Image (tube, grey):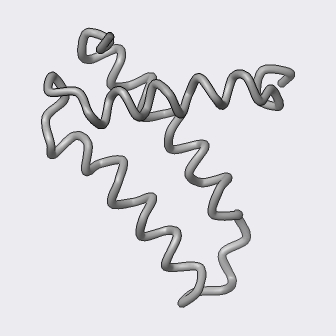
Amino acid sequence: MRKLLSLRHWKQVFIRIYRLLISRQVPVHQKLLFVIPVLLYWVLPDVLPFLPIDDIAVTMIAAEWFTRWMEGKHKTPS
């Protein structure tokens, strides 16, 4: 729980997500599996206001999931 509240942890997650998104080792269709749902969720709460989770929370959860999945699947970009 302490890790999830750490700004240092989230800084590292977003650095890793950026590296994965610019990496040539990760195919475009896999990058879109992160980008499209996050972008849609940033727009959909305006259309569907009954969704209770904040935009940034969804982005952070998706970023954590995507980095773990891609780093496990592909060699971590340097």
Occupied quadrant, residue 38? bottom left
Quick check: 21 left or right of 1? left
Q: What is the x, y in percent for residue 55?
A: 63, 63
Front residue of this view, candidates 67 and 10: 10
72 versus 18 height, above or below: above
Occupied quadrant, residue 19? top left
1 versus 18 height, above or below: above
- Which residue does the image show at 66% across and 31% down from the upper left? 10
Front residue of this view, candidates 39 and 19: 19
Q: What is the x, y in percent for residue 67?
A: 43, 27
- Which residue does the image show at 45% across and 22% down from the upper left? 68
Q: Across the whole image, how many numbered discs are drawn on residues?
A: 0
18 versus 40 height, above or below: above
Quick check: 4 left or right of 72? right
- Which residue does the image show at 60% across and 54% down from the upper left? 58
Q: Quadrant of the N terminus?
A: top right
